[in-house]
Image (cartoon, rainbow, N blue to C red):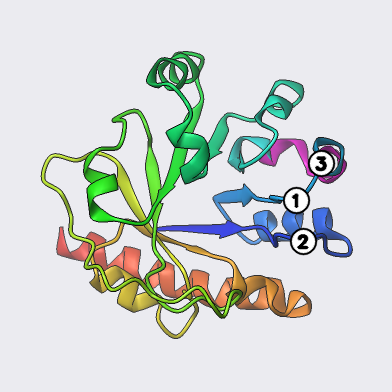
């Protein structure tokens, strides 16, 4: 059961320090998503990240920055994926990158390029950060023989994290539950992480 944190879409005070603190607390994957930020603004955050954590960071925008750091993860938002040729995706994989993407429908999942490691799917619940971003009415089902992991997105917090596991997702990505109150970001992450570890332990017992 993966637990992924997505960055605040807007700038925060001492943001790099908060990101380092999340990694120090045990975060395995962090998605750096700043849709309205320049490459320079993203680079300003990256320069203050501890070097040992670069391999855990996925870039949503300004992929070219990966060449300046030991970053091996790239995320393709839905629009970017649709305008990126399969050949380019295969080239990135051949060069050692781990790719992820985002979808909103079951049909999209069934037709994803097999080279994506995982995909965000949602919104599963009503968003905590975007009031107009309501839960999808679609039931996302596991597809047989599909190796692309399904990561639930949208409205996920401490209270409903277990439900994500019950829905047979491979993990969850959280945003509002962390950044709506930045002062409590680490505390809230640790609470959710504790639930994640309980789920992983239970899953291992049931194997």
Q: Is the N terminus in the top left, top right, bottom left or bottom right quadrant? A: bottom left
Chain-order first, disc 3 or disc 2: 2
Please indicate whether residue 97 sits to the left or right of residue 44 in the image.
left
Q: Is the C terminus in the top left, top right, bottom left or bottom right quadrant? A: bottom left
What SS does tag 1 mark? loop
**Who's the residue at 24% across and 60% down the image?**
204
Q: Compared to 202, does 181 lie above or below?
A: below
Mark pair 3, 2: CA separation: 12 Å
Magenta stretch in the rendered image: 43-53
Where on the picture, by quarter, is residue 61?
top right
**Who's the residue at 77% across and 61% down the image?**
10
The residue at which mark 1 appears reads as 36
The residue at which mark 3 appears reads as 38
Mark pair 3, 1: CA separation: 7 Å
Circles 2 and 1: CB distance less than 8 Å?
yes
Mark pair 2, 1: CA separation: 8 Å
**Who's the residue at 31% across and 31% down the image?**
113
Q: Nearer the viewer, residue 197 or 185?
A: 185
Q: Which mark is residue 10?
A: 2
What SS does tag 2 mark? loop
Q: Nearer the viewer, residue 148 or 16?
A: 148
Mark toward the viewer: 2 or 1: 1
Q: Mark 3, residues whose alpha carbon is within 10 Å: few (<14), some, or many (≥20)?
A: few
Please indicate whether residue 114 sits to the left or right of residue 60 in the image.
left
What SS does tag 3 mark? loop
């Amino acid at each position: 059961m993966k637990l992924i944190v997505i960055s605040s879409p807007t700038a925060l005070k001492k943001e790099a320090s908060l990101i380092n603190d999340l990694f120090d607390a045990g975060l395995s994957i962090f998605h750096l998503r700043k849709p309205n930020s320049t490459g320079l603004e993203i680079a300003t955050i990256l320069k203050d990240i501890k070097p040992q954590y670069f391999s855990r960071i996925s870039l949503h925008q300004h992929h070219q920055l990966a060449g300046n750091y030991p970053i091996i993860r790239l995320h393709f938002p839905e629009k970017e994926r649709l305008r990126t040729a399969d050949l380019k995706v295969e080239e990135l994989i051949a060069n050692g990158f781990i790719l992820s993407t985002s979808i909103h429908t079951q049909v999209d999942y069934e037709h994803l390029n097999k080279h994506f490691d995982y995909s965000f799917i949602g919104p599963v619940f009503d968003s905590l950060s975007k009031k107009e971003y309501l839960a999808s009415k679609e039931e996302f089902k596991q597809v047989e023989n599909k190796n692309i992991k399904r990561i639930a997105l949208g409205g996920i917090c401490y209270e409903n994290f277990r439900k994500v596991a019950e829905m047979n997702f491979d993990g969850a990505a959280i945003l509002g539950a962390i950044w709506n109150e930045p002062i409590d970001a680490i505390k809230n992450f640790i609470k959710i992480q504790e639930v994640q570890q309980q789920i992983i332990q239970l899953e291992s017992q049931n194997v």
